[in-house]
Amino acid sequence: MISSPNLTPSWFALALIMTSNSEETYRLYKDRTHWTVTFQAMASPCEIFIQCNNESEANQLASLAFGQTRRIETTYSRYRDDNIIHKINNSDGKAIEVDSELARMLDYAAQCHELSDGLFDITSGILRKAWRFDGKDYHPDKKLIKSLLDRVGWDKVEWDGKKIKMLPGMQIDLGGIGKEYAVDRVAELLFEKSGSTLMVNYGGDIRGMTKDNEPEPWIIGIEDPNKSRTAVGEIRLTNGGVATSGDLHRYCMVKGKRLGHILNPKTGWPAKDAPRSVTVMGNYCVEAGFLSTLAILQGENAKPFLDSLEIPAHCVM
């Protein structure tokens, strides 16, 4: 839930941008002071607010944002069979060389694993084979979870900064950092090209960048997971990232108890008594995403954990 002054669209300025085969790519429309870009990517609604001079510049920036987002999604999605992630996940114990961009992402994942004492682990995505988070009653297979844990653990991975080697059957899943990385990358590219005040919001993962002489913040409402279309607080963002983790959209019911989709890689289960949602501010969206996920995994200790970090955060139990 995001608001900023003068963001009511003027529909006379609406432009629908089409590809050569008539498939919709993005929508662009103008408010009195901002251009807004919207599209779907990474299984999320995506929107970008840009304060730039004219429609031509706005179109160029929108095209750049859309292209970069699609590139990142295509390159690092675990759901494709034609990218580097598929190659790594089907390497059968062989070392795979990666490019500099993926190397930076793996370095960051390794750092997060170390800082979290193993709670943030990009090899834990394989645990999804034991779970279904569709909001319905579910009966997890404890034996399957236990067997999958044998293939989880970044400490089992050989990574030298250029090549990655995993045990046969292991997989990596960048779902915990991929969308946040796209948000940061797109925001920084647009700001580098235009110098314009902007905000990128991909499904609640957000990055704001503002000119030094324009300190007016974006106002971001924090949605109440217990009451639809209601805010429980707000964040004022100028330069930095925001991310929210929780069970609002992805969860299952186990013996009458609601369990969110974020799994502890050490147990294979969601954290006990975790918050309904955690919203965190950071210098970057990837930083905020890591901290919000880590807070969820603290379970009932999420709020004390966030308080100990002394960072802007909002926790709804």
Image (cartoon, rainbow, N blue to C red):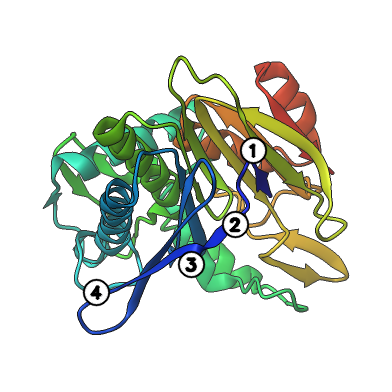
| Foreground pick, 8 / 240 | 8
- Amino acid at circle 2: Gly
Q: Quadrant of residue 175?
A: bottom left
Tag shown at residue 268: 2
The image position of residue 110, as x and y in percent, is 36, 35
Residue that carries the numbered disc 3 in the rendered image: 43
Q: Nearer the viewer, mark 1 or mark 4?
A: 1
Residue 66's place in the image compared with 159, above or below, is below
Give SS at disc 2.
Answer: loop
Residue 116 appears in the rendering: no
- Amino acid at circle 1: Pro
Tag shown at residue 81: 4
Q: Nearer the viewer, mark 3 or mark 2?
A: 3
Question: Of marks 1 and 2, which one's residue comes earlier in the chain?
Answer: 1
The image position of residue 31, as x and y in percent, is 53, 50
- Disc 3 vs disc 2: Cβ atoms closer than 8 Å? no
Taking the view exactly as shown, the residue that stands out farthest to the front is: 12
Disc 1 crowd, CA 10 A, few/some/many (<14, 14-19, 20+):
few
